[in-house]
Amino acid sequence: MPKLILLRHGQSQWNLENRFTGWVDVNLTAEGEQQAIKGGELIKAEGLEISRAFTSVLTRAIRTCNLALDAAGQSYVPVIKDWRLNERHYGGLTGLDKAETAALHGEDQVKIWRRSYDVPPPDLSAESEYAFAKDRRYTGATLPVTESLKTTLDRVLPFWESDIAPALKSGDTVLVAAHGNSIRAIIKLLFNLGEAEILEIEVPTSNPLVIELDAALKPLAAKYLDEGRANPVPVLAEHGVPKEA
Ligand SMILES: O=C(O)[C@H](O)COP(=O)(O)O
């Protein structure tokens, strides 16, 4: 039976500093590294044998993937990296302090930018120090200048269909080490959640979410491996999916 392990990266430097990160390539903190290792140890303790791993082209997710595979004793597993698993592009908010932005624009506006389904933040200017067009990891890609959760899902979906779903359909156990919002996009897709329902889901850092699927990739059961950091989310309770405390 296919199994999908969704793993959000461990704490990053800008998670710690409370800055809008999106596609900026910040590293893990020492605590984030430990979280990634713990995620791998939980995968090992669960006896999960991973056939393939997928991650983004951002260091915090790649390192989480590698640290978790090492800790699980499975560093030999092939890892495919693709920008379509990147975090949601935070547009003109990229690099800003989240609390300062709320003080400037109001909590309500920031909540809309962070958690509405289809309202993107303002565009990132081409002159910004964070503009990604010249970054060679994106050569040939049509790059967004901002993204909502909806447009994040729009670019995760083709990669899901071309690479991740076929691996699962062949019966593999698949690890996806990615980001809060690319993982929320996959959860919305898999559990067929509505636009309001997905807004209730917060993905905890580096707490493996293991989803058992049937042959048509319909979820049969799901659980976080670090149950001490999880509380039930009403909307997913019927699938046994808990939420971080
Ligand atoms: O990109 C970021 O700043 C975070 O990784 C996710 O941010 P969010 O909690 O605002 O979705």
Image: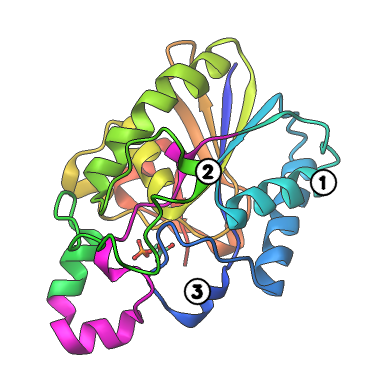
Answer whether residue 105 is magenta in the image. yes
In the depicted structure, whether residue 42 falls above or below residue 216? below
CA distance for labels 1 and 2? 25 Å
Q: Which residue is mark 1?
A: 70
Amino acid of disc 3: Trp
| Amino acid marked by disc 1 | Asp
Horizontal side of 88 relative to 168 (left or right) equals: left
Q: Nearer the viewer, residue 101 or 117?
A: 101
Task: Tell me if residue 107 comes above or below residue 127 in the rendering.
Answer: below
Query: Which residue has dot 2 on it?
Result: 137
The span picked out in magenta is 81-108
Decide if residue 111 is on the left or right side of residue 86. Answer: left
The image position of residue 33, as x and y in percent, is: 71, 64
Residue receiving disc 3: 14
Frontmost of labels 3 and 2 is 2
Who is closer to the viewer here, 40 or 126? 126
- Whether the residue carrying mark 3 lies under 8 Å from ligand 1 is answered with yes
Q: Residue at x 68, y 63 (%)?
A: 35
Upstream in sequence: badge 1 or badge 2: 1
What residue is rendered at 22% in x and 83% in y?
Answer: 102
Q: CA distance from mark 3 to mark 1?
A: 24 Å
Disc 2 is placed on an element classified as helix
The nearer-to-camera label among 3 and 1 is 3
* Residue at 23% in and 51% down: 148
Ligand 1 quadrant in view: bottom left
Between 48 and 59, the one nearer to me in the picture? 59
- Near mark 1 (Cα within 10 A), the count class, few <14, some 14-19 or many ≥20, is some
